[in-house]
Image (tube, rainbow, N blue to C red):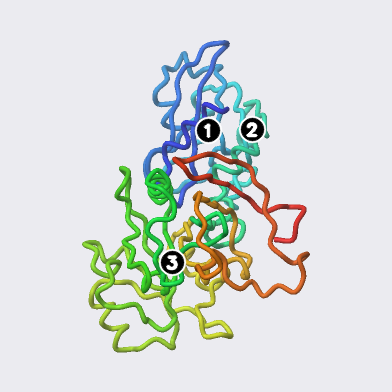
């Protein structure tokens, strides 16, 4: 199953809004083949794997797959039909598919056809791998990974806004690799005003994500690098009806997509409504790289699913800009709590990977 999970990872950045799926065929102690879902609209992992096997190999084999095989007709035929027709004896599944069109029906079809089904092998690993897909299906919004690059004392910039560079080159390359695997990267208007980022994948090979800016009044400058990219259709702005209509028309004329969202009580973009709008456009995963204001807004809205904190071995001091803005807490009990599930050293920086603490209050 871990080999199937490793295969599934190869599709990251190419299959969304589909899930990441890998499949492995075994008979006795012999590995017959492996496959993964390569690109949205192309054959699913199970069907591709079966096509690689001879009839004799497939008959009586065991298939390991990290997600329940589909049983409905979409852009491709149902995988359950391919497995049954091939004469597969057993299918081992890591996790049930949360898609309402499947959600147990695929395994039932296999069982009804005489195929033995085992569920729950490496389930936790499978759930983490496809967390964006699960969130998209169950909550109707994209999965959010909030990334913070900060000093030892929790600062992301000097008081004058200078932030290049707190973390090292190795960390920047790793961030670009993460960008290439997710659907979109999101920042706030202040980050554009202070840093003028490109939000592209430059340090690694991979495709550029959709660039999303939360800008309630369209105050970012017209010459911002995000607005001068050669693919303007990849830049989307979340705004409100309070935006300047003339500037809105100007941006649309440049090919920028404007998504008008509800305004929250403070006049800012209502982030929960914005996430639903992004989900409606097929966005299943977002890397949030905004400044402290956006980070705090996401946490206050309860939208942060996982967190990466990259800590550089430097001190900036109390006059620097905080990595997390005002959370409006009255008690420590109400503070968002996370659990570290991984730690690694990237160059000179320490990276902490955190998920919501189910025993906490986040």
In the displayed structure, 250 sits above or below 203; it is below
Give the mark nearer the N terminus: 2 vs 3. Answer: 2
Q: Secondary structure at mark 1?
A: helix
Q: Secondary structure at mark 2?
A: loop
**Percent coordinates x, y for residue 256 in the rendering:** 30, 72
Give the mark nearer the N terminus: 3 vs 1. Answer: 1
Image quarter hosting the N terminus? top right
Q: CA distance from mark 2 to mark 3?
A: 34 Å
Label 2 close to label 1 by CB (< 8 Å): yes
Q: Is residue 126 visible?
A: yes
**Percent coordinates x, y for residue 233 in the rendering:** 29, 65
Give the mark nearer the N terminus: 2 vs 1. Answer: 1
Image quarter hosting the C terminus? bottom right
In-front residue for pair 213/158: 158
Neighbor class of circle 2 (other Cα within 10 Å; few <14, some 14-19, many 20+) is some
In the displayed structure, 141 sits above or below 338; it is below
Residue to which mark 3 is pinned: 187
Q: CA distance from mark 3 to mark 1?
A: 31 Å
Q: Is residue 150 left or right of residue 185?
A: right
Residue 76 sits in quarter = top left
Give the mark toward the camera: 3 or 1. Answer: 3
Residue 347 sits in quarter = top left
In the displayed structure, 167 sits above or below 260; it is above
Give the mark toward the camera: 2 or 3. Answer: 3
Neighbor class of circle 1 (other Cα within 10 Å; few <14, some 14-19, many 20+) is many
Q: CA distance from mark 2 to mark 1?
A: 9 Å
Neighbor class of circle 3 (other Cα within 10 Å; few <14, some 14-19, many 20+) is many
**Percent coordinates x, y for residue 79 in the rendering:** 49, 36
Residue to which mark 1 is pinned: 5
Label 2 close to label 3 by CB (< 8 Å): no
Residue to which mark 2 is pinned: 122
């Amino acid at each position: 199953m871990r080999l199937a999970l490793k295969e599934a990872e190869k599709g990251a950045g190419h299959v969304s809004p589909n899930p990441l799926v890998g499949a492995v065929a075994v008979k006795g102690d012999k590995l017959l083949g492996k496959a993964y879902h390569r690109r949205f609209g192309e054959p699913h992992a199970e069907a591709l794997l079966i096509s690689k096997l001879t009839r004799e190999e497939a008959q009586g084999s065991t298939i390991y797959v990290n997600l329940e095989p589909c049983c409905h007709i979409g852009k491709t035929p149902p995988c359950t039909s391919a497995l049954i027709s091939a004469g597969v004896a057993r299918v081992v599944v890591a996790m049930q598919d949360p898609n309402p069109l499947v959600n147990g029906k695929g395994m039932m079809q296999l069982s009804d056809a005489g195929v033995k089904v085992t569920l729950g092998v490496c389930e936790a690993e499978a759930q983490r791998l496809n967390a964006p897909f699960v969130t998209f299906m169950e909550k109707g919004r994209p999965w959010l990974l909030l990334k913070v690059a900060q000093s030892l004392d929790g600062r992301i910039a000097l008081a004058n806004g200078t932030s290049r560079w707190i973390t090292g080159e190795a960390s920047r390359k790793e961030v670009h690799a993460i960008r290439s695997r997710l659907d979109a990267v999101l920042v706030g208007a202040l980050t554009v005003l202070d840093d003028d980022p490109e939000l592209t994948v430059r340090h690694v090979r991979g495709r550029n994500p959709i660039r999303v800016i939360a800008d309630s009044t369209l105050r970012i400058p017209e010459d911002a690098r995000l607005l001068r990219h050669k693919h303007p259709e990849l830049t989307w702005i979340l705004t409100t009806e309070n935006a300047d209509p003339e500037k809105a028309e100007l941006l649309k004329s440049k090919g920028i997509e404007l998504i008008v969202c509800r305004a929250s009580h403070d006049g800012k973009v209502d982030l929960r409504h914005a996430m639903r709008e992004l989900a409606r456009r097929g966005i299943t995963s977002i890397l949030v790289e905004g400044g402290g204001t956006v980070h705090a807004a996401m946490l206050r809205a309860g939208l942060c699913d996982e967190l990466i904190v990259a800590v550089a071995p430097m001190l900036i001091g109390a006059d620097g800009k905080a990595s997390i803005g005002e959370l409006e807490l009255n008690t420590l009990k109400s503070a968002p709590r996370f659990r570290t599930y991984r730690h690694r050293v990237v160059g000179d920086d320490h990276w902490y990977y955190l998920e919501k603490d189910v025993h906490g209050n986040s």
